[in-house]
């Protein structure tokens, strides 16, 4: 799942990943919370600075309702991105702008780590 208010970036990410992964995108945290009620993403690419509901509010509410929370990667051009990712307790971060190969590698690594974590906990990864 991609949570970012930049529609063009969401389209680029979707195009880069759709051949291998199912990708949904939403423009803010409130829409993301609605979507996770019916879908369980394995990975969330999140811009922390969003309109309507920011990334911090989304993460806090999402972790309360998710049976098995997805890996979360913070995406931003902000110079303090590593600090922001740490505050969010994110599983990683990706600095904007990024290359398609960098994005694909990060997603592959996060999902591989997520599947290994789920197997270790006895949970089937989706």
Image: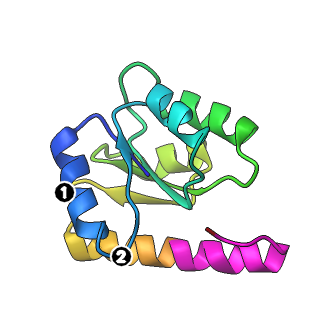
Q: Taking 74 as reference, is 105 above or below it?
A: below
Query: Could you tell which of marks 1 and 2 lies nearer the N-terminus?
Result: 1
> Where does label 1 land, which residue?
12
Residue at 56% from the left image edge and 80% from the top image edge? 112
Residue at 20% from the left image edge and 51% from the top image edge? 11
Residue reaching furthest right? 122
> Where does label 2 land, which residue?
20
Judged by depth in the image, the label closer to the viewer, 1 or 2, is: 2
Give the colour scheme shown: rainbow
Residue nearest the observer in this picture, 56 or 118: 118
- Image quadrant where residue 99 sits: bottom left
Q: What element does badge 1 sit on?
A: helix
Disc 1 packing (10 Å; few <14; some 14–19; many ≥20): few
The segment highlighted magenta reads 111-125
Residue reaching furthest front? 38
Q: Taking 35 as reference, is 117 above or below it?
A: below
Side of 40 where 32 appears, left or right: left
Residue reaching furthest left? 8
112 drawn magenta: yes
Q: Are marks 1 and 2 in contact (CB under 8 Å)?
A: no
């Amino acid at each position: 799942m991609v949570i970012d208010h930049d529609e063009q970036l969401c389209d680029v990410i979707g195009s880069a990943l759709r051949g291998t992964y199912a990708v949904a995108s939403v423009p803010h945290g409130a829409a993301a919370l609605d979507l996770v009620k019916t879908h369980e993403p394995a990975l969330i690419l999140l811009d922390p600075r969003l309109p309507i509901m920011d990334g911090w509010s989304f993460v806090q509410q999402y972790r309360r309702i998710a049976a098995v929370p997805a890996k979360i990667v913070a995406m931003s051009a902000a110079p303090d991105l590593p600090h922001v990712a740490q505050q969010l307790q994110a599983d990683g971060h990706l600095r904007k702008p990024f290359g398609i190969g960098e994005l694909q590698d990060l997603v592959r690594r996060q999902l591989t780590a997520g599947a290994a974590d789920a197997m270790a906990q006895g949970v089937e990864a989706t």
